[in-house]
Image (tube, coloured by chain):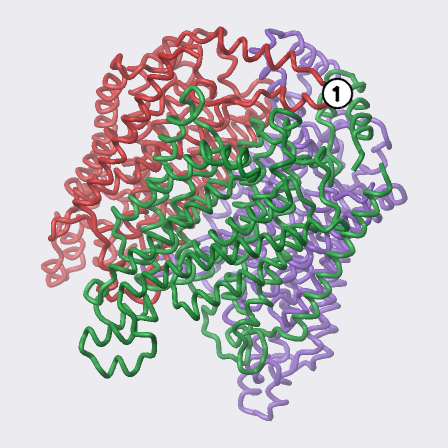
Chain colours: A red, B purple, C green
Amino acid sequence: MASGAEARRQRDAAVVASLQVVLLAAFAVLARYDSSADPRGGAPHDALGPRYPIFQDVHVMIFVGFGFLMTFLRKYGYSSVSFNMLVGTLTVQWAIIVRGLFELEEDSKIHVSLTSLLSADLATAAVLISMGAVLGKTTPLQLILMSFIEIVIATANEYLGVQIFKAVDAGASMFVHVFGAYFGLAVSLVLGHGARIRKGEGNALEGASYTSDLFAMLGTMFLWMFWPSFNGALVEADAQHRAVINTYLSLASCCAVAFVLSALLSHDNKFDMVHIQNATLAGGVAVGTGADMLLQPWGALAVGAAAGALSVFGYARLQPFLLSRLRLHDTCGVHNLHGMPGLLAGAVGALAAGLASPEAYGGAAALAKAFPARAASAAALAGNATAAAALDGAGRAAGAQAGYQLLALAVTLAVACVGGLVTGFILKLPFLNGVSRDYWFSDEYHWEVPSENHSHKLENGNEQEDTKTETLYDSQLHI
Amino acid sequence: MASGAEARRQRDAAVVASLQVVLLAAFAVLARYDSSADPRGGAPHDALGPRYPIFQDVHVMIFVGFGFLMTFLRKYGYSSVSFNMLVGTLTVQWAIIVRGLFELEEDSKIHVSLTSLLSADLATAAVLISMGAVLGKTTPLQLILMSFIEIVIATANEYLGVQIFKAVDAGASMFVHVFGAYFGLAVSLVLGHGARIRKGEGNALEGASYTSDLFAMLGTMFLWMFWPSFNGALVEADAQHRAVINTYLSLASCCAVAFVLSALLSHDNKFDMVHIQNATLAGGVAVGTGADMLLQPWGALAVGAAAGALSVFGYARLQPFLLSRLRLHDTCGVHNLHGMPGLLAGAVGALAAGLASPEAYGGAAALAKAFPARAASAAALAGNATAAAALDGAGRAAGAQAGYQLLALAVTLAVACVGGLVTGFILKLPFLNGVSRDYWFSDEYHWEVPSENHSHKLENGNEQEDTKTETLYDSQLHI
Amino acid sequence: MASGAEARRQRDAAVVASLQVVLLAAFAVLARYDSSADPRGGAPHDALGPRYPIFQDVHVMIFVGFGFLMTFLRKYGYSSVSFNMLVGTLTVQWAIIVRGLFELEEDSKIHVSLTSLLSADLATAAVLISMGAVLGKTTPLQLILMSFIEIVIATANEYLGVQIFKAVDAGASMFVHVFGAYFGLAVSLVLGHGARIRKGEGNALEGASYTSDLFAMLGTMFLWMFWPSFNGALVEADAQHRAVINTYLSLASCCAVAFVLSALLSHDNKFDMVHIQNATLAGGVAVGTGADMLLQPWGALAVGAAAGALSVFGYARLQPFLLSRLRLHDTCGVHNLHGMPGLLAGAVGALAAGLASPEAYGGAAALAKAFPARAASAAALAGNATAAAALDGAGRAAGAQAGYQLLALAVTLAVACVGGLVTGFILKLPFLNGVSRDYWFSDEYHWEVPSENHSHKLENGNEQEDTKTETLYDSQLHI
């Protein structure tokens, strides 16, 4: 094995170790238990509350859902699930710090609670989506640096959207899905992956195997099942109940439509596992922004159906086009699962916000709870001056709220693209040593991989094959 | 590829799309948010309540549990988990509509709530059980049509059992497991699958591979672990607590006995993965009807032990007999996991109902809560005329309740068999184009399957094998 | 097949059946529903309470987490996940009885509740850890007998630690992890497994395959994700909230450090799947004893980082040393994942206990709740004589509590080693017929394993390979 590769791996490990030391120091200086986790805080018997199972559902989505969904590559399973875990564990720590700094408490400390962990998990989703665009073509260190930059930009963008524009986005389809997808696509574009993939040559490892497809379906299923928890994680009461119902229904119709479109757009009109693994989930993204709004059950079904069709169309038609024309390579097709359905989500959210009336929400107070910026005007509509005075806010009309929703969407798209482009140039710096083209989509760049033939040795008494693999592996090494 | 197969797949996709449109229209006309999911409904802070995690457990059972349990077939993994998902997502929508129509609210609308989603998931279990009997031998469209018919009949049967006979069935062992199993077996019989399976010829794909067995064990484990949630999903308070304890214990003893019987009844006295994957779960079925009754811990263990033995006996002895004598083919052995243990559950439930006294239940009111039809007589037993007057009901004696339990069981069995026979004849209609015998248990009928040899290409530089597979595939096509 | 092996398997099955009968009889005589599961008990609407989802998380850890983590062996997947299930289901029943006898209620009955099931699951973890040390080299009956002995000793040791020494151990790192690891290691030592493993010869089956590594990662992920539930399962309010935060953070830094150390200590500076599958979890163990103490977020990160480093060091350096010098074989490396991190946990717990002051805990009452033995002294410190009188306890100073924590740790270590040695000699009794060295790490000893070549038959039309396997299998049989 070339000592150069070893030295680089040692160096990368040392950088990761340093980052962990920095995180530890940041926590030591900045972070304390929230009062609800402090014995002096007088927490009730069930301090964890009903949000804990929802947090665990989201946790499963982040670490098993995303992790195994990416194992669809036949020889990149170790890396997919493990780098997802590595990037995820560093990102959640960093997200607690960065998000905490944006909402620092009076004592200048970050107060860590279950909500911090849940928010950190949600923020991490954006990074893992970006990772999907560049999966198999980057080193863990590149992914980790991307994450550290992305979390800062994503948090700032979310702050802008939520605190300044007063946009709402219950399931984070704009601030997580759109942001993560276009950020990752911009990184991929700058890294020039698409340009280096020569059609028909040496892409043998980019596809799936029968077994890897089934592992990926496990990721799909856990994402699909627990998405109602994702979209309802940060809202409450009837809004949370609606988020669960809308997401469940949107995912149901999305799945059916994804099967239909897959059969209509695929070779020989058969189903395509790539579509089933991914496009069946687009309904969860597309209903995210409006998950807690008054879509009504049929509206949720309609959104899901549109998302399923849009996503399969993306995989079957748009993605090859983007690769050949824009040289844009997108390993997991995050544009089709998170990008376009996220844009749809933003539009649906704006539409539902534009239709929201105090009557439908049962009064000005409830409407103001759903759309904080509408507080005053809603109260005015109801002719209740006292309530209007008690609530601060822009006092927006429904149309204005819709406009701000679209503004937040457009700004998110722009910030993600620019942020991703800049990040891409940073990740391209020569000293970071990207993965050699010969090792794209191959675990062998970072792992000792057991020879498949080992398992047949006992039966065949044939060790020749083994040697062959080893030889190939060594001779191919010119990284 | 023959264009006939493509045309048929296109046609089937179009039918599925139409069904989704019909569902969307039905929701638009009939379904609205329940008041607990409506901002005008005054839902409390934790509107989702403690039932949400239980719903998610059931959700995992339906989509990962059933889905992966059926991946045991070595070359039908794509289809098993994906068709389970497709059928499941259409069925839950349809079940919300059909069940909603049976309990229409005053405003002639179906009120959609978390309970609707949970009930829809439970109803879907019946369809997925039926699917197990015909797995690998039917098209997705056949399965979907079966589902749409089955949900109507099953809901009507459950209405009859619960509302007319006033039978109780906490874990739905009668209304879901018995119904789903015998319905599916009747369909299989009519489709003539058993008669077409010629022993020792061309059944190479009916078995498992090492890897497919492990994927199936994932399904087994999630079913096994979350079954207490299934059996306790729709009851409350101490009854729910008992359902969890009884189911946990029944599954524990069932598992141990299944291993014992598997070793005693299998070749060379080794364990058989088919038994471990399935019979270990029979305790969850067998304790279902009486899950919330006063079985006591030892009673739950006894029920589980009996179920484990019965189920392994079914797999090892009865199933081959039914195939050779009745020409009844049952891919997943649903008769052994759901059918017979479900009958046992009905008997256990009747027995426990027959032994239920006001004393054991701590009074007439509690007994009436457990067995609604016993309201009056229980109150009378307690000599409390006021309570008797306040509660309506048949005022049944314990023995009568036991009788009605058995009546509901018998009627369920009969309705399932007749309904399944009729449905089988419908699915046999020529224009539905069943799966050619050559493609039974093969994903290749509906999927582009990656050649296993692909993954060795890099090592071997050998692409001949690939071509061979493709050739075989084309030449075999005479569907 | 030699009839001797069959006869032995029949005999073992009969013994397991007898044990199940004994368990059933024990439950019949001793166990009743707890009042919270009895209709006469007046249980509230949500009798299951917020602990039920936490119980289910732990349940998943025990049956999917441990079960699939052990499937890393390439040809022992059936046995790993199935024997985990078999041993687990018998152990939980036995643990309910044994633990119930240690805390018998006034009516001389064991009161079965959700807490019983949860405690039984936690106790079972110790047995499954021990099983990890001897995995692949023992029969199911040996494992089951080990379990029945181990549960008695472990429960007695825990009683000593908790009731007599008044040590606290929220995540059971001492009473479950340290105990289970050293008990299993002692059994392995006595069984002489290490001495019989000749380096470089016939160990072909001890490693992983690409697929088996991915199945194992599923176990890893579910353990990693749900560990906060494990460590917080038996505490409440702010203590439970802290347990979740501390465990989440400890596992995050542990994971990052495990990757770093794996790259630094492995061949060619690549990552090693064994480290990623196991050492990433050590943070959950190491933070267990002090999980509910005031570690602060940075303290939890520090503990996790130390545990990750310690665990990888164990796998990469110490384990080979122990095998070559002490002839100690440890299939899953439980010493590195549970043993040493558990000792670290005990030390961290003692340190945090030694630093615990009434001020930090917000008063004497809160401190006494966290450390029952400090009740009186804490009250005295606060100058509250009435409270001191109302609370019984040793009235320990902080330093004394730290000392008792270390005493409990040392005693646990000693009891586990001695108990394991004795148990090892019992399991070595000739009539138990251990697994022949030729069948170590092979499912074929206990299962009909489908030939891998079956799946290629259709493509190759080649059945010769099949026969070869069968022949080899028969000729190798001299057990």
Q: Give residue A55's position: percent from left, percent from top.
A: 37, 49
Q: Chain letter for mark 1, please.
A: C
- Foreground pick, A16 / B295: A16
Whether residue A298 sits left or right of residue A364 in the image: it is right
Q: Residue at x 60, y 34 (%)?
A: C73
Total marks in image: 1
Mark 1: secondary structure: helix
Q: Residue at x 50, y 53 (%)?
A: B117
Depth check: give the residue in front, B303 or C191: C191
Q: Which residue does the numbered mark 1 point to in the structure image?
A: C458
The three-letter amino acid code for the residue at tag 1 is Leu
Instruction: Name the residue at 82% across, 23% down.
Output: C467
Q: Is residue A361 left or right of residue B299?
A: left
Residue B303 position within the rendered picture, expressed as x and y whole percent measured from the top left: 71, 64
In this orientation, does residue B110 appear?
A: no
**Looking at the picture, how far across and down is residue A36, in whole percent?**
26, 59
Q: Position of residue B238 (x, y in %)?
A: 52, 72
